[in-house]
Amino acid sequence: MDLTYTAEEEDFRARLREWLGKALPALPPKPSPDDWPGRRRYDLGWQRTLYDAGYAHVHWDADPTTRLIFLEETERAGAPYVGANFVGLLHAGPTIAAEGTDAQRARWLEPILRGEEVWCQGFSEPDAGSDLAALRTRAWRDGDDYVVSGSKIWTSHAEVADWCELLVRTDPTAPRHRGITWLAMPMDAPGITVRPLRTLAGSAEFAEVFLDEVRVPAAHRVGAENDGWRVTMVTLSFERGTAFVGEVVACRRVLGELAREARANGRWDDPVLRRRLALLEAEFRALWRLTQWNVSEASAGGVPGIGGSVFKLRYSHARQELYDAAADVLGDAALDLDRPWVLDRLSSLSYTIAAGTSQIQRNIVAERILGLPKGR
Amino acid sequence: MDLTYTAEEEDFRARLREWLGKALPALPPKPSPDDWPGRRRYDLGWQRTLYDAGYAHVHWDADPTTRLIFLEETERAGAPYVGANFVGLLHAGPTIAAEGTDAQRARWLEPILRGEEVWCQGFSEPDAGSDLAALRTRAWRDGDDYVVSGSKIWTSHAEVADWCELLVRTDPTAPRHRGITWLAMPMDAPGITVRPLRTLAGSAEFAEVFLDEVRVPAAHRVGAENDGWRVTMVTLSFERGTAFVGEVVACRRVLGELAREARANGRWDDPVLRRRLALLEAEFRALWRLTQWNVSEASAGGVPGIGGSVFKLRYSHARQELYDAAADVLGDAALDLDRPWVLDRLSSLSYTIAAGTSQIQRNIVAERILGLPKGR
Amino acid sequence: MRFRLTDDQRALGQGVRDLLARRFDRDALRAAVERPALDRELWRELGAAGFFALRLPETEGGVGLGLPEAVLAFEEAGRALLPGPLVATHLAAGRVPGAAEGETVVTTADTGGLVEWLTEADVVDGVDGDVSGAVALRSVDPLTPLHRLPRRAGRTAAEPVAVLLTAAEQLGTATRACELAVQHARTREQFGQPIGAFQAVKHLCADLLVRVEVARAAVYAAAVTAGPADIAAARLLADEAAVRGARECLQVYGGMGFTWEADVHLLLKRAWVRTRRAGGGTESEELLAGELLAGAGR
Amino acid sequence: MRFRLTDDQRALGQGVRDLLARRFDRDALRAAVERPALDRELWRELGAAGFFALRLPETEGGVGLGLPEAVLAFEEAGRALLPGPLVATHLAAGRVPGAAEGETVVTTADTGGLVEWLTEADVVDGVDGDVSGAVALRSVDPLTPLHRLPRRAGRTAAEPVAVLLTAAEQLGTATRACELAVQHARTREQFGQPIGAFQAVKHLCADLLVRVEVARAAVYAAAVTAGPADIAAARLLADEAAVRGARECLQVYGGMGFTWEADVHLLLKRAWVRTRRAGGGTESEELLAGELLAGAGR
């Protein structure tokens, strides 16, 4: 067991840090949260900057440890988040890389890396959330096209995306997981309506996407027809333990800020609050170590594990605890949306739900790691 | 809503208190926990004392509020527990009263009330715990007798019982709940072996009972053959919210003692511990009020509710919290079995398991009160 | 001892529920979210129905009922998420002209700190009515405008009736959270069955109910005894039932619960606001600790 | 960064596991419960295997390994519920003659308080070896005899290595609790299927594993860094994983878990005993709080 980084890794870190020190001050001002075109421009601009500096590939080709360092350092330096590049870099891109044809890779990968095209994700549907395989958006073949009708939900950046990685049902008679196909849908195709979806935090980070006989060329299908479930899962399982690196680094910073705030406003003297923060410190130290553990295992094995469910179960809960503690530090100010941490507290509520509820994650841990039988 | 007692109820309480003041000092010394014959004598003696004073019927005929007062006052006064009379007074007796023939009632009820006969319960089996209907102890008819073979577990007072209320399977081909019969088995019948069952608290409060072709006269069957499940459930649902009256009174006393001990040893100055005890105070105040609520509802409606599951879920958890807090008050002494509360802490571990695990109770609450569908 | 609702009490609770169902149903709630202002007409209707004058003696033009009835009314208000400084106005009835009738809207500022509905209120109780220095917050609850006032003088103990009525509102909100969760669990299907058929969801709902019923017993009992320790206990349990209830309702709702359109967040945000009122958390805990120690000699 | 077991470390852990499976299997454990005495022969065997001398330099006759290897060995001891003052003897190796070899059994009395295995030990560390005034308790853990010593002088901070090795033992016990729960859930049938097919049981087991794995990451990392804050975090998480793990294992076991014959209670009782060792609870919490505040300026 070794927690020191190799000379090579430390070198990567040092060069990255130095580069960030120069690159970040040159960034344009951050757009406001509801300025979607501005956000697209900003996020793509940052991706282009990374590309030019040779860091664009880090999510795809780099060793997990290198990726960990990249995510840790960019978060520490306050660099922009992956933002509008999320789906392209972290899901659609890797899927195309793994399952696409040469022509598809040539068409789609480079624009993602260069920060030229934005992807969004059309997986969830109103009636297919935890049970994703229940999706009902239909597609049927018509000449060289698929014709798609249905609706998708929880789609980020739909307003400004160029492409949507879309799961559709092409064989309604097949078993649930069998009749699904993966398509790359151009977002400017006729028949697409995007409606912003307001969350309980008051913002419209997500959208609903309604599809009314949208034509998608069959050449945009990745993988075989009706093989979309496997195509998608290949990429989901690509996760190498780095999904939450930046967030854990950020949570540890927030915890320090909470301690300072509590000392400033006198609440630090309450042992109940102080020890609660101490337990969170223990928690996030451990979550950081668990991240390093999962990354090291992934580096060594090359085979992605499902330890991600263990991590997500604990982390999503810990994040909610963190912001509940923040509310106690703030006192009355916890009701003021203009104070730091208050909106984060609202956002934290989604963590035990999104990307697989805690209930689903516990099923996964119990059945796939512990080998307990599936319920009847 | 009224929390004051009627003049009649207050009168009952005053007379009971006065009587307890005289009766308790006349009690013989308490036998040691492993002196079973002594415990039998002591418990039956107390029951006889109650009988002579006119209090024996209180569990059967009294209004639930009167029963509440009886249980509250006897606990406060430190009167003996129901002990060896438990099954006779609180389960087998009411079952016979409700479902027995005139002859059966005449034979069995009076000796229970007079403290002359001890009953034990033969329901659970090693493979039929939460799933009681899975019981496999077999009985087949042979002339005027049933012949019974199998084994029972978690039987209290088996060593000194005269009778066992026994559930046996008389029709192995019927649906699970249909082929069960209720028998009164004399504990001196040949073929019965009683083996003490040691608990994690180190004591042998329970026993296993092995039955090897034990003959039970068919005249000892209560209710029809194969109707034993219904016969049993009639009595289980008799519970009128008074099952834990004495225990809640006792828990509130313990909480006060914990506060005093904590002040004496200095731990009261730790706000973490102090507020934890305060939350338990809130908890047990509420549990006492919930008891009064359930009893009042039962008094008014006559129809037993299933609010007992709500109460048990919360109470069993609260009791464990109480004794965990006791351990924190005790500090190092929490590891000393000779200190008060330490054995109680061990015993409290059974509360979320015995008489229906918390998991089963949550099913009951969700399905029968909230109307949620049964799982497939 | 008859610790259960009398027919009259049941009728009173139902009456308030019916009034609110008629005048502040889900559509009205959602309209209020988009345009948060006090409905003065509804306020007068509540006044006419005796909501504010409930505990005023009949000789003073009140309804002449007691704390238990007030608690039942405020529980319904909490269940409906009725907005406005209801507790303060109720407490001002008979003291501030027009409060009993719902003509005058009264909010309270205690000795400073958070003030609900400051701009909309006609009268501010506490801080000698001096609200200079009040700063508007961007309130987390769209249905509770908030200001912050500098604290004055030594803070006095919370008014027990206000603490109890807040607990009653929390109880109502917790009840609503349980109802919503159960309703969703019954109807929402995933994996080919209602999600309420899965033990994980089923048990969340059961725990919701248990917290509600324990809090209910504590709140109703405190209404009968009016004892400060009973009130403190009621408040702690009701705060928890409301906040955790709304949180777990959100978990049952899944993604839909995270949307603005679902009502779940309104329950949670209001419950959060109420936990900050005087008498919550540490204050009630220390009161109970003192009571526990004092009574331990019994 | 290669934060994973090396082949050597894996082999070392497996070696200790094999030794204990051979010399202290379940039968031996249950025999020890009925007749609690130190198995001196096993103790010497552990000494011969390097259990106590693991961290002593080779120049001093030790194995010359580090804290990570010691943690792995103590984790196995905790998993097997191996009795005896293992931590104290390990810490005394090289300082107290015979400790490294398993010939001398050393227990620790710090500055007073609880002392494990006082009567059986050959040497008592701390309190200048003065054990007058020691009073035997009736120990809750049948496998850990306890005495209580009057406290001396000002209490010093806990020795970090002792705190960490205790955490390692707790981790092992938590692991065993998880293994037992899963095994029982797989084989015990009720309602016509293994109880592990029910979500309620399944989710208990999942939570058990999560607590184990989080504690494991913390304990192993603390072994690598040897930092006091890392050790405090590891101890808090391992204590919780062991105590709650044993509790929830008992819940999965149901009635059988409440029997003396099942091993569950032995896990819980040992976990309880270890939580009382120096460095647990408040002590580690306050250490971390201080560290958090000090580092907050970073």
Image (spheres, coloured by chain):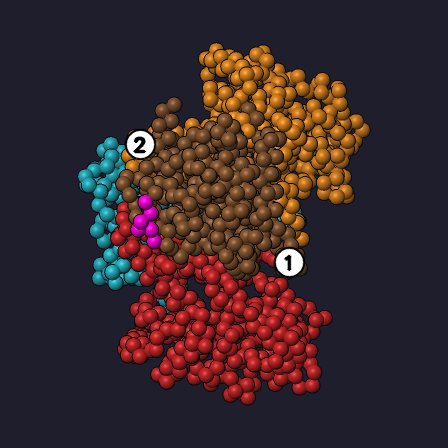
Chain colours: A orange, B red, C cyan, D brown
Which of the labelled discs sits on residue D189, or is there none? 1
Residue type, label 2: Arg
Of residue A238 and residue B253, the one placed in the foreground of this image is B253
Position of the C terminus of chain D by quadrant: top left
| A146 with respect to C171 (left or right) | right
How far apart marks 1 and 2 lie (CA) works out to 54 Å
Q: Nearer the viewer, residue D182 or C212?
A: D182
Q: Chain of mark 1?
A: D
Which quadrant of the view contains residue A321? top left
**Residue C125's x, y, as percent?**
23, 44
Quarter in which the N terminus of chain D is drawn: top right
The part of the image, by quadrant, that contains residue B211 is bottom right
Residue at (27% x, 62% y) in the render: C64
**Is residue A150 among the parts visible in the rendering?**
yes
Q: Give the crowd class for mark 1: few <14, some 14-19, many >=20 residues within 10 Å.
A: some
Q: Secondary structure at mark 2?
A: helix
Chain of the residue on which disc 2 is drawn: A
**Front-most of residues A70 and D220:** D220
Residue at x 51% of width, y 34% of height? D54
The secondary structure that most of the magenta stretch takes on is loop
In-image side of A33 versus A183 (left or right): left
* Marker count (numbered): 2
Q: Residue at x 52, y 87 (%)?
A: B107
Label 2 Cα crowd, 10 Å radius (few <14 / some 14-19 / many 20+): some
Pinpoint residue C261: horizontal percent, then vertical percent: 51, 40
Type of amino acid at the residue the image marks with label 1: Glu
Q: Which residues are magenta?
A: D130-135
Give A335 or B317, whichever is nearer the viewer: B317
The dot on residue A263 is 2
Rendered view: B21 above or below C119: below
